Image: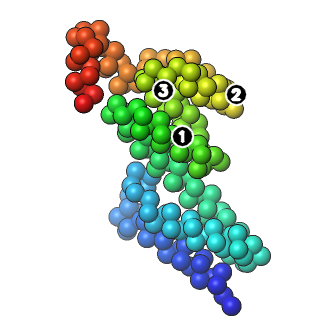
Amino acid sequence: PRVDYAHYVKGLVNFERSRGPLEKLFRVDQSQRPQDNLEASYRSFSVVANQFPDSVYAEDARQRMVYLRNQLARYEIHVAGYYLRRGAFVASANRARYVLQTYPQSESVIEALQIQVSAYRQLGLDDLAESSMAVLKENYPDRAVAYGDRGSRAEGTLIERFTEFVRRSFGAGLVKMIRV
């Protein structure tokens, strides 16, 4: 008779399992770590919120789902940013697209669009970059202006500036060797 409570407790266990005592004490950013427990927690809370909407635990489950959705999206953005810094532009663009498709209501949508624009620019896919930039400008005009029409910060990301410096100084052959 208390299946809703069982799923809620299961969600709480996985919710708390993701953080150890030292991580709680030092308030470590959990978005930089694999999110397996948080995904399981999200699924459990989703069962409570969707299958038992009148439960006393449903509202708390929904609120925790919002937090978990933002955490999961932030993790994907962290990985996409890592790929972007390493020069894996296709992987970076794919992770950003995954955030846009899977977590469209998260706080990380803006960063996902920005990463997509940068990755597409680096890949020479100007049509896709302009499309992502148009979405960014339409939905978040203040962030698009701060981000610049180029698709990255006005001066470019560190990898963009380094790549451009090496290209101008040593030629395109060395740039290919560096990316490998």
- Can you give x and y, in whole percent of width and height, for residue 166 in the image? 27, 15
Q: CA distance from mark 1 to mark 2?
A: 17 Å
Q: Identify the residue shown where x is 68% and y is 91%.
A: 1
Given contact means CB atoms under 8 Å apart, are the residues at marks 1 and 3 in contact?
A: no
**Element on which disc 3 rests:** helix
For disc 2, the marked residue is 138
**Element on which disc 1 rests:** helix
Label 2 environment density (alpha carbons within 10 Å; few <14, some 14–19, many ≥20): few
Q: Is residue 116 visible?
A: yes
Badge 1 amino acid? Arg
Whichever of labels 3 and 2 marks the residue nearer the N terminus, that label is: 3
For disc 3, the marked residue is 120
**Element on which disc 2 rests:** helix
- Can you give x and y, in whole percent of width and height, for residue 123 in the image? 43, 24
Please say if 176 is above or below 4: above
For disc 1, the marked residue is 97
Query: Which of labels 3 and 2 is toward the front?
Result: 3
Q: Identify the residue shown where x is 58% and y is 36%.
A: 110
Q: CA distance from mark 1 to mark 3?
A: 12 Å
Badge 2 amino acid? Glu
What numbered label is drawn on residue 69? none
Residue 171 quadrant: top left
In this rendering, position of residue 101 left or right of residue 160: right
Residue 140 quadrant: top right
In this rendering, position of residue 22 left or right of residue 106: left
